[in-house]
Image: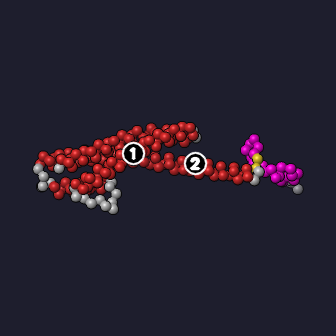
Amino acid sequence: MEELITLLSQFNDILKKQISNYIEYIPILEEEELAITNCDLTALEKIVIVKDQHSRISQSLEQRRVSILRKICYMIAFDPRGQKLSLSLFKITFKKYLDNIKTLVNEDTYKKILEVEENILYTANEFENLFETVYPRIYRNQLILKKLLRNITLSINLFQSEANIGMNYDNLGKAHSNANKGSVNSSMRIKA
């Protein structure tokens, strides 16, 4: 039972680290949003590097969290195959486990496990609330950047295709074909 309590404490610690990582991520998202708004590619490049580092930390923490959750599931005789090891699944499963072992363990051990569970539930609620705040912003920024990339790619392709057929641009950005440059015919409408 002590090993289970230790694993539960480690699980709670990882959740707290994930929370602090998300809190550190918020200013990065704000900088990214500002760079997108201002069309500042230099700042955006710097932010991408910082975001990449934070993403790696997040992925590492998530892998550790899932690994510990698997160990906890093994210890409480729960088979998670075919299911995503989410916090909500953990809460439901662990509650059932606590109900099943209540009469099998001594009172002090049961109180320790209840205390650890209460800490985990508090941390898990904080984690879920923060995740609901941060994740939509990450997703929105990704969508905006993908749309900008698509628009830029279309513009570049348009300029390349016009350059291939010999288009020139005047100082106002209006396209003029080289083929019609020497022509005397006008396309102006004249009132009859």
Can residue 5 be seen at all in this image of the molecule?
Answer: yes
What colouring style does the render use?
Answer: secondary structure
Question: What number is the disc on residue 148?
Answer: 2
Identified at 29% across, 50% down, the residue is 68
Query: Mainly helix, strand or loop, the magenta region?
Result: loop
Q: Which residues are magenta?
A: 169-189
In the structure shown, which secondary structural element does the residue marked by tag 1 occupy? helix
Residue 185 placement, left or right of 99: right
Q: What's the amino acid at mark 1?
A: Ser
Cα distance in 3D space between marks 1 and 2? 26 Å
Residue 55: image quadrant is top left
Identified at 25% across, 59% down, the residue is 78
Horizontal and vertical percent position of residue 54: 42, 42
Residue 177 magenta: yes
Q: What's the amino acid at mark 2?
A: Leu
Q: Residue 183 versus residue 136: which sits nearer the camera?
A: 183
Q: Residue 154 versus residue 136: which sits nearer the camera?
A: 154
Q: Which residue is mark 1?
A: 58
Can residue 129 be seen at all in this image of the molecule?
Answer: no
Horizontal and vertical percent position of residue 65: 32, 49
